[in-house]
Image (cartoon, rainbow, N blue to C red):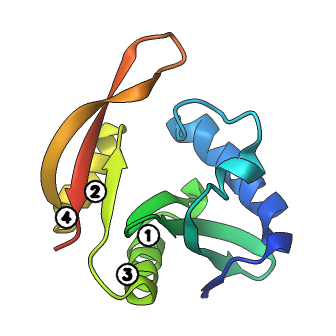
Amino acid sequence: MIRSRAATDLPACVVALRVVHEVDGYPLNWPAEPEAWLTPPGLRGAWVAVEGEAVAGHAIVTGAGELSRLFVSPQRRGAGLARELIAHARAAHGGPLVLEVANAAAAAYYERTGWVFTGSAVADWTAPDGSPVTLRRYRSA
């Protein structure tokens, strides 16, 4: 089930995000304040995919329609949760979305599912080893 994220969901979201970080390296840099990272300035909407009490996935929309903080717990992948979260976010936003990714597997997912590559740029932050990070930009079709 996809529903709006409540403040009381944040601890479970952080637990799920930690697993994603350990398995996939997302986010590339673990945030000092993960709950704040999941609730950035300009937040327009936040959703969770839940199974019982467990958070299985998460997504937000910020700014001018930017999809962000999208993740699905590794044990729930392949069930279409990312696609459902994206569809829910897009419907709630009322139009096309944009996003940036640094992870090659995430970029491949977006390309497979019809997102349009619009360019790349070097991030204003670095990888844990201090190296530059290239962000790939996409817009929904």
Q: Identify the residue shown where x is 37% and y is 30%.
A: 123
Inspect the image, locate mark 2, and give the three-letter code of the amino acid beneath it: Tyr
What residue lies at 76% left-to-right and 71% top-to-bottom? 54
Q: Is residue 108 left or right of residue 23?
A: left
Q: How far, Cα to Cα, is label 4 from label 1?
A: 13 Å
Q: Which mark is residue 96?
A: none
| First reached walking from the N terminus: tag 3 or tag 1 | 1
Q: Quote the CA–CA distance across marks 4 and 3.
A: 13 Å
Question: On the image, which quarter does residue 96 sit in?
Answer: bottom left
Secondary structure at badge 1 equals helix
Q: Is residue 115 above or below residue 24?
A: below
Q: Residues within 10 Å of mark 1 (few under 14, many from 20)?
A: many
Which callout, 4 or 1, points at the residue further toward the start of the chain?
A: 1
The one of 23 and 89 positioned closer to us in this rendering: 89
**Of residues 136 and 49, the one drawn nearer to the viewer in this rendering:** 136
Q: Earlier in the sequence, mark 2 or mark 4?
A: 2
Q: Are marks 2 and 4 in contact (CB under 8 Å)?
A: no
Q: Amino acid at mark 3?
A: Arg
Which amino acid, mark 1? Ala
Residue 17: x and y in percent read: 66, 50
Image spot of residue 77 (x, y percent): 48, 63
Q: Which residue is mark 2?
A: 109
Task: List the residue tagged with mark 4.
Answer: 115
- Eyeballing the image, is 30 above or below 117? above
Per the model, the C-alpha gap separating discs 2 and 4 is 9 Å
- How many labels sit on residues? 4
The residue that mark 1 highlights is 82
Kindly identify which numbered label has been placed on residue 90: 3
Q: Earlier in the sequence, mark 2 or mark 1?
A: 1
Q: Could you say whether the residue bearing mark 4 is in a helix, strand or loop?
A: loop
